[in-house]
Amino acid sequence: MTQDGFKEMQTVFKDEFREHTKVVIEEFRRLNAEVKDIKTTLGPTVVIVAQQEMRIQTLESRLDNVEQKVGIVRLAR
């Protein structure tokens, strides 16, 4: 009689474990899809930021030249 109770508990435990495993696997799939979306978006964003940084450096250099020609004292940036 005791053995039957343990077998029944073991069956219940296995069923619950399978359900939890399915949920975990589904969450990992969803997370993987989200990471893929982020990577897809991040690549072009990094390029845009790099281009903007180069543009800012160019504009700061040009502004330094203008300030020097006009005789304005450069403020800290």
Image (cartoon, rainbow, N blue to C red):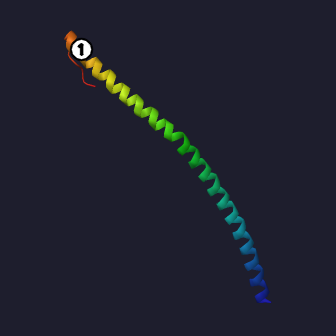
The x, y position of residue 38, in whole percent, is 55, 44
The quadrant of the image that shows the C terminus is: top left
- What's the residue at 25%, 24% (across, down)? 76
The quadrant in which residue 50 appears is top left
Quarter placement of the N terminus: bottom right
| Horizontal arrangement in the rendering, residue 10 relative to residue 57 (left or right) | right
Foreground residue, 28 or 16? Answer: 28
**Residue 24, picture quadrant:** bottom right
Give the amino acid at mark 1.
Glu
Residue 41 is left or right of residue 51, and the answer is right
Q: Is residue 63 above or below residue 17?
A: above
Residue 12 in view (yes/no): yes
> Is 3 located above or below residue 52 in the figure?
below
Vertical arrangement, residue 6 with respect to residue 46, above or below? below
Whether residue 72 sits left or right of residue 38 in the image: it is left
Locate residue 59, reporting x and y percent. Answer: 33, 21
Given residues 5 and 75, the one toward you in this image is 75
Q: Would you identify the image quadrant in which residue 17 lies?
A: bottom right
The local crowd at label 1, few if under 14, some if 14 to 19, many if 20 or more residues have their Cα within 10 Å, is few
Residue carrying label 1: 67
Q: Residue at x 54, y 39 (%)?
A: 41
